[in-house]
């Protein structure tokens, strides 16, 4: 069972929003900017956005370098 860990639907939504924002650039977003992008989507309050980022990080879908948030590359 070495596949990706499943995430709840709200975290899937958050990941999709982040992927749309970043695109294929491999660019990161400042942590505050990632939160702001999710809040601007109107599906997330600030606390919900922060929690979604925590879930995504704990499950390996995103990672942090300094204050930047990056989406973990996949083979897809």
Image (cartoon, grey):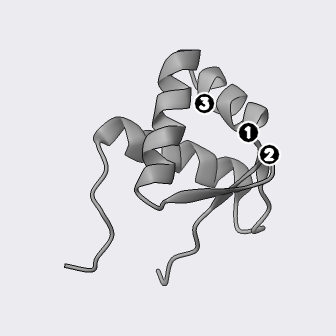
Mark found first going from the N terminus, 1 or 3: 1
- Above or below, 55 against 33 in this view is below
- Looking at the rendered structure, the secondary structure element under dot 2 is loop
User: Is 18 situated left or right of 16 in this image?
Assistant: right
Q: Which of marks 2 and 3 is in front?
A: 2
Residue 36 in sight in this render: yes
Please state the horizontal and vertical placement of residue 41, each as a whole percent of the image.
Answer: 59, 26
SS for callout 3: helix
C-alpha gap between disc 2 and disc 1 = 6 Å
CA–CA distance in space, label 2 to label 3: 17 Å
Question: Depth check: 28 or 55 in front?
Answer: 55
Callout 2 touching callout 1 (CB < 8 Å): yes
**Percent from the top left, x then y, of residue 9?**
30, 40
Which label sits on residue 31?
A: 1
Does 53 appear above or below 46?
A: below
Q: How crowded is mark 1: few (under 14 residues within 10 Å), some or many (20 or more)?
A: some
Q: Which residue is depicted at the point 71% across and 26% down?
A: 36
Q: How crowded is mark 3: few (under 14 residues within 10 Å), some or many (20 or more)?
A: many
């Amino acid at each position: 069972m070495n596949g990706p860990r499943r995430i709840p639907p709200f975290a899937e939504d958050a990941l999709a929003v982040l992927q749309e924002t970043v695109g294929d650039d491999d660019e990161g977003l400042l942590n505050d900017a990632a939160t702001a992008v999710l809040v601007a989507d109107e599906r997330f309050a600030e606390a919900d956005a922060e929690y979604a980022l925590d879930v995504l990080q704990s499950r390996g879908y995103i990672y942090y370098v300094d204050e930047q948030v990056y989406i973990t590359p996949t083979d897809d």
